Amino acid sequence: MNIIDYKKSFTNPLRQATLCFLIKGDQVLLAMKKRGFAVGKFNGIGGKKNDDETIENTAIRETQEEINVTVTNLVKRETLKCYFPDNPEWGQEVSVFLVSEWDGEPVETEEMNPQWFNIKDIPFEKMWPDEKLWLPLVLEGKSVEAEFMFDKNESIIDQVLKVLP
């Protein structure tokens, strides 16, 4: 199965979600997910949108809840669509933001354990497999649109990746 065929049969809208990557000099903040979806993986900070909020407000709320930081400068760099034919409820459209200004210091919570990494030393082997394809582009300041389809083992089975002008 490929993305084009799957989208023809996919009738539910994708769940809206966010990811924020805090940037400090040549470092990026990633957090180890401690429970729920993506447990055991490093990722940006984010989560699902509530019905009554904008995607930007979702990003702000999620960073407050997950690492006790209030972002004050969001720059959207990517729209990422993820499809899971074996678990359609996992499907999501993710708005990816780079953040260079925030209030507070990242702290560990029940859900996330934040850690700073040099951008050259990102632990891609402990992340979703698609992130090694798009995250370096986003960290270079490029805007990206991407779609990934994952199998039941969370491996990529199809992809579309476009760098926007």
Image (tube, rainbow, N blue to C red):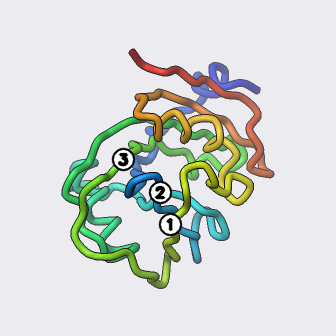
Whether residue 70 can be seen here: yes
* Contact (Cβ within 8 Å) of mark 1 with mark 3: no
Q: Nearer the viewer, mark 3 or mark 2?
A: 2
> Which element type, helix, strand or loop, lies under badge 3?
strand
Disc 1 residue type?
Trp
The residue where tag 1 is placed is 116
**Relative side of 59 to 152, left or right:** left
- 107 or 65: nearer the eye? 107
**Residue 96 spot, x, y in % from top left:** 41, 44
Count of numbered labels shown in the rendering: 3
Identify the residue at image location x=24%, y=63%. Answer: 102
Image quarter in which the C terminus is found: top left
Residue annotated with mark 2: 27
The reply to whether discs 1 and 2 touch (Cβ–Cβ < 8 Å) is yes
91 sits to left or right of 45: right
- From the top left corner, tell me how far across and down residue 162 is, in percent: 52, 20
